[in-house]
Image (spheres, helix red, strand yellow):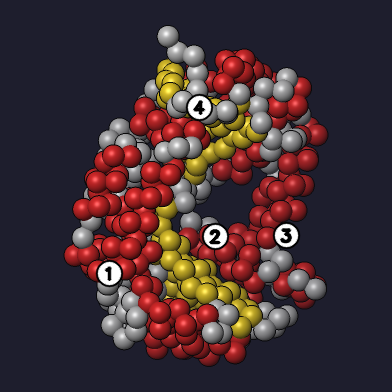
Amino acid sequence: MTPASRLSRRKVSFDESVRHRMLGNGARLFVLENRFNPTVAISGSLNAGSLFAPPDRRLLASLTAGELAKGTARRTKLEIAEELESRGASLSFSAGGGDPVGVDVGAASLSRDLEVLLDVLAEVLLSPVFPEEELEKERMRLVGVLREQQDQTSVRAFEAASRRIYPPGHPYHRRRVEERIAAVESVSRDELVRFYEDRYGAETLLLVLVGDMDSEKILDGLERRLGSWKRGPSPEIPRPGPVPPAPGSETVPMPDKASADVVLAQPADLVRQDPEYIACILANSALGQSSLTSRLGVRVRDTEGLTYGIHSGFSATYLAGPFTVSLTVKPESRDAAVAATLEEVVRFRREGMTAKELADEQSSHVGRFKVDLASNGGIAHAIDAAVYYGLGVSYLDEYPSLVGAVTREQADVAFAKRVDPDRFTIVSAGSFDIP
C-alpha cells in the first residue's frame, strides 16, 4: 500500500497529518510521518536563485548552490561524500530549472541514518567554505557544458528567442554564450562567499520531511541544528514589470544538422499562484503537452508527418515566464510545420476544448497527481511546492476537486487571453538554404 493510499484509507487529510513548526529565525519545517517503509525523503527551498544575482552574474546562484556541499569548515568534499554514500544517503542543492527565485534542496536516507543526514545538511547550510580548487574544477566543467550545448539546435533556438523577447537584465533573458563563458571563467570564490552571505539564511528556508520517523523528535532536532542560523534576507520577491510581445522571426544557421528546432514563444502573465493556473494548464495539455495525444501532436506529427516531436507549455513560477511551442523538424519541413502549428493554435483559441478533452485532461491530471504521491519523495515534493507558493498543505487535499471544478469556458477564456499567435516570436535553428 502506497503512502498516499494509506492516508486515504485512514481518511486523514494531509492538512491534519503534517506537523509544522516555525523557528524563531523564520525557518519553516514540515514533517509527515509515514511508517510504510524505513526511508525518509527531504524536499526544500531557499530564496537564493538567479533573480537575486546581478544581471551580468546570474550564474552566481547556480554556482553557489552547486558548491555548497564541496567542503565545510569541518569536512572536505570527499569526507562529506563518504559520510553519505557509505549509507546510501543523498543530498543536493541546485538553482535553475526554470525558477529564477528558489534554490532546491533534496535529500534522502534510510530512517536509521536520518540523524547523520540532518547533521550533514545543517553543516553544509551553515558553514560552507567554497574551496578554490573545487570552484576551478566547476569552472572548467561549466565551460565545457556551455560549449557543448551550443551544438544543440534546441538550445540555440530557445536562447535566441529569449533574447528577442526579454531585455538585458531581465531574469529570463539569456545572454550570448561568449558572455556567459567569460563570466564563468572570471567568477571568483569571493563572489560566491558574498552571494552566500547576502542570500542564504533561515527566513526563506523551507524543509519538508516525509517518512519513517518521530515527528516531534525530528522537529526538535532540526530546531537544535538550525535555530541559531542567521535570519538572513527578507522573503520579499522583486518582480520585473510586464514585457511586451516581440513578434517576428529569426533563423540561427547551424551547418550540417540533420534536424532543426523551432521555438514559437511569447511573454505570458501566468504565475503559479494565479487562480486561473489550473484552467490554463488543462487547456495547454489538450493543445500540446503530449506529442502523442494533443491537438498539435495529432495534427503536426501524426497526420501531416512534419515533426519528430512537438510540445507547448507555460513557464509559471513566482515569476511569469513565456508560453512556448517547441518542435523538431527536418529543415525542409520547417515552413510547413510552422504553418500547421499556427493554424492549430488559432483553431484551438477559436473553438476551445471539447467536453471529452476537458474530461480526459482532468482525469489525467488527477491520476498523475495521485501517482506522484505514491512515494515519500513525491509527497515531500508536493508539500514543498504547495507551501513554497503560498498555497498551503491543504492544497494537496483540495487539488483533485479544484481540477474537477474547472469548466470548459473557464479553461478556454483563461488560455485565449494569454496566448495569441500574432504575438509569437518564431526562431528556428539548423541547416537551412538561406540566400
- The residue beneath circle 1 is 133
Earlier in the chain: of badge 1 and badge 2, it is 1
CA gap, disc 1 and disc 2: 38 Å
Q: Distance from label 3 to label 4 (Cα)?
A: 42 Å
Circle 4 sits on which residue? 256
Contact between marks 2 and 4 (CB within 8 A): the answer is no
Q: Quadrant of residue 241?
A: top left
Q: CA distance from mark 3 to mark 2?
A: 17 Å
Q: CA distance from mark 4 to mark 1?
A: 38 Å
The residue most toward the top is: 435
Three-letter code, disc 4: Asp
- The location of residue 234, given as percent across then percent down, is 29, 63
Tags 4 and 1 touching, CB below 8 Å: no
Under tag 4, what secondary structure? loop
Q: Amino acid at mark 3?
A: Val
Comparing 347 with 107, the one in front is 107
Is 323 drawn above or below residue 148 in the view shown?
A: above
- Circle nearer the viewer, 1 or 2: 1
Left/right placement of residue 323 relative to residue 395 reads left
Residue identifier under label 3 = 371
SS of the residue under disc 2: helix
Q: Which residue is mark 2?
A: 386
The picture quadrant where one finds residue 408 is: top right
How packed is label 3: few (under 14 Cα within 10 Å), some, or many (20 or more)?
some
Front residue of 94/259: it is: 259
